[in-house]
Amino acid sequence: MGGTRHRVSEPVVIRELRPEEFGRLSGIGPFAGRVVPATLPGRILVAESPTGHIVAIWGALQVIHVEPLWIIPDYRKNPGLGRRLLTRMRALLRDMGVTRAFAVLGPELPDLETRQAMARRLNFEPIPGDLYMVRLEE
């Protein structure tokens, strides 16, 4: 499906993909080479060609955002405090049934090198791309 050529002038239908259809996403676009779980924490819109091929995907996925992490300046040099917080946060997330979470390491850390070193020490993985926000209020 992903390699099929389409005339861009073809009309498309934009609709929400039903959970029982999530398997259709396997092997296309951002899901290439991945198995799509039968359930996802969110909803997905697709655009389909007149022949039913998925030509666009946009997901509204719920993710756990573990923030803010703040430590009073006097305690920031305590090497065990961050590790202990992380251990307890992981236990809390497992208790919630969460398998993945993300965090933004921001301007409170002095520079990119410091943020990256901290992330590596805590076994965080970088997420490809840039993070942006959209405001929905009008």
Image: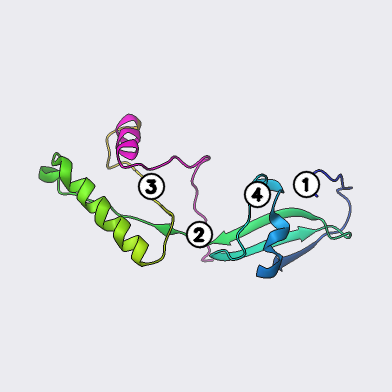
Q: Looking at the picture, how far across and down is residue 68, in whole percent?
A: 30, 54
Give the residue displayed 67% in from the left and 62% down from the top: 22
Residue type marked 3: Val
The residue to which callout 3 is attached is 104
Is residue 18 shown to the viewer in this render?
no
The residue to which callout 1 is attached is 2
The residue to which callout 4 is attached is 31
| In magenta stretch: residue 135 | yes
Q: Nearer the viewer, residue 114 or 134?
A: 114
- Neighbor class of circle 1 (other Cα within 10 Å; few <14, some 14-19, many 20+) is few
User: Mark 3 vs mark 4: which is more N-terminal?
Assistant: 4
Q: Do the residues labelled 4 and 2 touch (CB within 8 Å)?
A: no
Q: Is residue 15 left or right of residue 37?
A: right
User: Mark 4 vs mark 2: which is more N-terminal?
Assistant: 4
User: Mark 3 vs mark 2: which is more N-terminal?
Assistant: 3
In this rendering, which labeled residue sits more in front, label 4 or label 2? 4
Q: Do the residues labelled 1 and 2 touch (CB within 8 Å)?
A: no
Q: Looking at the picture, how far across and down is residue 59, in whole percent?
A: 61, 59
Residue at disc 4, secondary structure: helix
The range drawn in magenta is: 113-138
**Circle number at residue 135:** 2
Residue type marked 1: Gly
Residue at disc 3, secondary structure: loop
Q: Distance between the residues labelled 3 and 2?
A: 18 Å
Residue that protrudes farthest toward the top in the picture: 113
Residue 113 picture quarter: top left
In this rendering, which labeled residue sits more in front, label 3 or label 2? 3
Residue at disc 2, secondary structure: loop
In this rendering, which labeled residue sits more in front, label 1 or label 2? 1
Q: In this view, does 128 lie to the left or right of 18?
A: left
